[in-house]
Amino acid sequence: QVQLVESGGGLVQAGGSLRLSCAASGRTFSTYAMGWFRQVPGKEREFVAAINWSGDWTYYADSVKGRFTISVDNAKNTVYLQMNSQKPDDTAVYYCAASRLGRPVKTYEFRYWGQGTQVTVSS
């Protein structure tokens, strides 16, 4: 089993920044990549960004490209999401996820999920 715990969510004004963290534990050796997703009530869970544990591959949704940066510290088994120039549309519950695939981008390609952390961007 793999456990994922997100932290760093909160309130921020439009144009501001937040940094989310996801600490992974358990059988992390069985995972090869990490991702961030977000979800608002009534909508499908949306892919945000993904990265492999080596940090040499990243992929971003068009909606966040140029504003968000995903990174990993594989020695700490931690993945980060730096969110800059935030917009009210970024308001969502953000979920960390782990995959056994090398370059996952779809929801069903991630096996393990965290509990989520709320991000609220005010206008």
Image: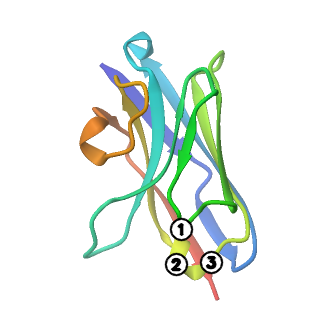
Q: CA distance from mark 3 to mark 1?
A: 10 Å
Which residue is depicted at the point 32% across and 46% down?
A: 106
Question: Mark 3 highlights which residue?
Answer: 87
**Dividing the image into 4 quarters, which one contains the C terminus?**
bottom right
Mark 2 and mark 1 in contact? Answer it, CB < 8 Å. yes
Mark 3, other Cα within 10 Å: few <14 / some 14–19 / many ≥20 = many
Quadrant housing the N terminus? top left
Mark closer to the chain start, 3 or 1? 1
Q: Is residue 111 left or right of residue 21?
A: left
Query: Which mark, by number, is residue 89?
Result: 2
In the depicted structure, whether residue 60 falls above or below residue 89? above
Mark in front: 2 vs 1 = 1
In this figure, which residue is indicated by the disc labeled 1?
A: 63
Coordinates of residue 22 in the picture (x, y in percent) = 54, 38
Numbered badge on residue 80: none
Spot the residue most to the bottom: 123
Secondary structure category for the residue under label 1: loop
Locate residue 101, reporting x and y percent: 35, 25
Is disc 3 in contact with disc 2, using a CB cutoff of under 8 Å?
yes
Camera-side mark, 3 or 1: 1
Q: Amino acid at mark 2?
A: Asp
Q: Are marks 3 and 1 in contact (CB under 8 Å)?
A: no
Q: Residue at x 62, y 60 (%)?
A: 65
Identify the image quadrant of residue 13. Answer: bottom right
Number of residues whose C-alpha sits closer than 10 Å to that of mark 2, classed few (under 14), some (14–19) or many (20 or more):
few
Mark with earlier residue (2, 1): 1
Q: Amino acid at mark 3?
A: Lys
Neighbour class for label 1 at 10 Å: few (<14), some, many (≥20)?
Answer: few
